[in-house]
Amino acid sequence: MRTEEPRPVRLADYRSPDWRIGTVELDVALHPTATTVRAKLSISPNGAAAPAPLVLDGDELTLRSIRLDGEPLAAESFVATPDRLTIAQAPQRPFELEIETVLDPTNNTKLMGLYRAGSTYCTQCEAEGFRRITYFLDRPDVMAVYTTRIEADKAEAAVLLSNGNLLAHGDIPGTSRHYAVWHDPFPKPAYLFALVGGNLGCVSDSFTTMSGRNIRLAIYVEPGKEDRCDYAMDSLKRAMRWDEVAFGREYDLDIFMIVAVSAFNMGAMENKGLNVFNDKYVLASPATATDGDYAGIEAVIAHEYFHNWTGDRITCRDWFQLCLKEGLTVFRDQEFTADQRSRAVERISDVRELRASQFVEDAGPLAHPVRPTLYHEINNFYTATVYQKGAEVVRMIKTLLGPQAFRAGMDLYFTRHDGHAATVEQFVQCFAEISGRDMSQFMRWYSQAGTPEIKVAPHYDTAARSLRLDISQIVPPTPAQPNKEPMLVPLALGLVGRNGEDLPLLLDGRPLPRGVIEVTRASQSFLFSEVPERPALSLNRAFSAPIKLSLPIEAGELRFLAAHDCDPFNRWQAIQTLAMALLKSNVAAICSGGEPRLDRGLMDALGAILKDTALEPAFIALTLSPPSEADIAREIGCDVDPDAVYAARRKLRAAIGARHGKTLTETYTRMMATGAYRPDAESAGRRALKNACLDLLALTETDAAIARAFSQYGEADNMTDRMAALETLAAHNRPERAAALDDFYARYANDPLVIDKWFALQAVIPEPTTLDRVRSLTRHPAFSAANPNRIRALIGAFAQANQTQFNRRDGAGYDFVADFVLELDPKNPQVAARLMSAFRSWRALEAQRRARAEATLRRVAAIQSLSPDVHDIVARTLADN
Ligand code: 0A1
Ligand code: ZN
């Protein structure tokens, strides 16, 4: 808890460690409230010129004993507090330190360090959780080889796991206890350490690597849930193969384990050889998981597996380099999904997500560079900017270099830095060397926050048959960065001729490699020659750069691109651009008491897409969905009225339902499946389109449309269709809604992950009664403020996905969330801080809501006992720089 203003950590202050730790031998005796940890560390000075004190990190630790080279350390030669162990005069030679600490995993509510998820013992050490297990140099550039002995009562923990390969196991004679010894030969930072003990069911399989090594694969879950692991196991094997093919990366230990736990602060964790997962990203069956859940499992399993090379074999020198492993690994998992499913659909989904979360973050007080230079609490930097924008930055390197040079750069990175803790500079240097390019301007993507705004003015010269693009860019000011330098923006583009085909791209008379121009200055021009006709401009194809684009383009031309662009992303984007323009003007109309208008052109373009049977159903479904409320609000930028945004979007969707009723009904029927549920992308795409039709049709409010949803709800043979119908019903205050909600609870009361859907669904109902509903659901027996999944489902969904009710004009939504955060904060500050970030767009709201939000934020900020996590978020959210 805060006693004084905490001191930030700065990138500029980085120094290599004074000490090295070569090996770590842990001996952990599990006990519910008194687990003992004996750690034997081999420590040596790190070539330091001047003798340095040894200062080990701790966090809420209790020291039992300490020995140096086998001898008890005299009381006057060390100082141990819960958060530090200092030996002022440590020997300036290699020595062995033995530290015994005692932990209380059952009462560890922060879910960092060693804790219990239900009855299972598990650990979470990233970023700084290992220091809650023993005193250590808890920083990623201290890499050691770990040997871990675990012992426990057999009845309490029949399964004992840690990183690496199993060396030995057996009973402890004369007791009811047993033990297991694990050894991980790969040096790793402490944040990748993991240990699990519990009575778990196991599903196993095997994988033969490209060099013919046989790897045992094991997924551990709550007993009885083994039959829900098939998809996770299948995804794992596909990810392992893909990394061999796409990046030449082979798995390195004899065994790869995944453990699903019910209480976890995040999605999952890439501990070496022993990934620990939020069970939401492992367990799936057609009856309990939606297509979205299946896709999430595939992506997260792949993400954690890919970390084995990008994160574990090569880790980060310090936490400022977080994007080095996260941005790169997100890029890798996105590419994996694109290859496994549909590249176009994956790209559109990723960009939608980027705009809804990262662009919003970048536009508000929590904006920060992909590589921050300062933090108060590292846990608050596991953000959309580090992850999603970090992935976009890697993708731009690939776009600039081309696939072969990109792969060669990656290969160089893997060979050069294997076994080391690296920096972003070292990563980018590999591509600079391979390509011979100067990447110094590109580095601004890592250092400058904010979404660049690119303006393009086209000038076609009929006589000269040339096209000049005048392009200017600005990077908006962000906290602590009032002035920005121009970025290197790779813009993929196409000139689309009247027949719908791409015209040749000759820049200054030469063919343009890969169709990408490089914007490098605040303003510059590009001249295309031999352009036989005035083309339609398809810019930033496949979203080649994470920018905001503005281009004077007529609606007719957008409709043309929506119908003909060979870049599927830009076909989708053309519709989004049309819809965004309409939505913005309709929001303005609603705010000034006017009527929203209709756009015949947009409707026709949508109708054409809907009828185009050559298109993937998943693509059509995405095209039928207008920009999100958060995205519209961000585009409006200031004085936002979330009720007007919601109304405009709903009206547009209702208009689509009314205008295309017949086609939507036909499509709904045509997309119905025959045969058993299959989770593959194509089947999922058909369901996505079918359910998009169902939802749009229901917005016409006809009894028939509601009845269709109600009967789909009742008759569905899989969770995707049942849940989609329930979501549709939830948007309509009709008796069917209450009936379906009650039925849903009765069916799934014993399945917490399914009940989370029930919580979330009710939390996002855009009606004034929702706050009371959410409040009373916090007292529901299925709710628990000790479980992050329950919190995210109910409170998280309300705060982050219910724009109208969180942002109630009377401020009651803000107060409710703030009060919840304050109650949670002492128990789980990490999750509390994440909830608090829902306030990040408060300055963009209209005056009354803005005042309410500010009052709530100030009330929270005034509390002295805030955790560093929540304090950091609130302080930055309120700061006006
Ligand atoms: N490295 C993980 C994310 C992660 C970060 C912190 C955690 O602590 C609670 C847990 C997980 C990933 O990228 O998947
Ligand atoms: Zn990750």
Image: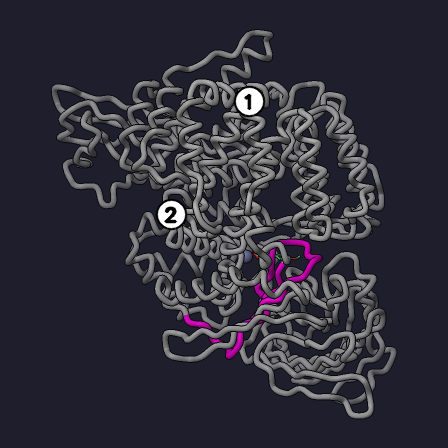
| Label 1 residue SS | helix
Question: In which image quadrant can residue 489 be found?
Answer: top left
**Residue closest to the eye, 253 or 39:** 253
Q: Which amino acid lies under the numbered mark 2 shown in the image of this protein?
A: Ser
Q: Residue at x 62, y 68 (%)?
A: 220
Coordinates of residue 38 in the picture (x, y in percent): 76, 80
Q: Residue at x 48, y 28 (%)?
A: 626
Coordinates of residue 586 in the picture (x, y in percent): 52, 15
Q: Residue at x 81, y 33 (%)?
A: 859
**Residue closest to the eye, 420 or 94:** 420
- Residue wearing tag 2: 342
Res 519 visible: no
User: Is 786 above or below relative to 189?
Assistant: above
| Label 2 residue SS | loop
Q: Which residues are magenta?
A: 250-277
User: Is 141 above or below relative to 744?
Assistant: below
Q: Which mark is residue 747?
A: none
Is 186 on the left-hand or right-hand side of 74?
left
Earlier sequence position, callout 2 versus callout 1: 2
Q: Residues within 10 Å of mark 1 (few under 14, many from 20)?
A: some
User: Is 299 above or below relative to 574?
Assistant: below
Is 375 on the left-hand or right-hand side of 504?
right
Coordinates of residue 72 in the picture (x, y in percent): 83, 86
State the separation of the CA atoms marked 2 and 1.
Answer: 29 Å
Q: Residues within 10 Å of mark 2 (few under 14, many from 20)?
A: some
Residue 258 within the segment the image draws in magenta: yes
Q: Which amino acid lies under the numbered mark 1 shown in the image of this protein?
A: Arg
Query: How many numbered circles does the render carry?
Result: 2
Q: Which mark is residue 650?
A: 1
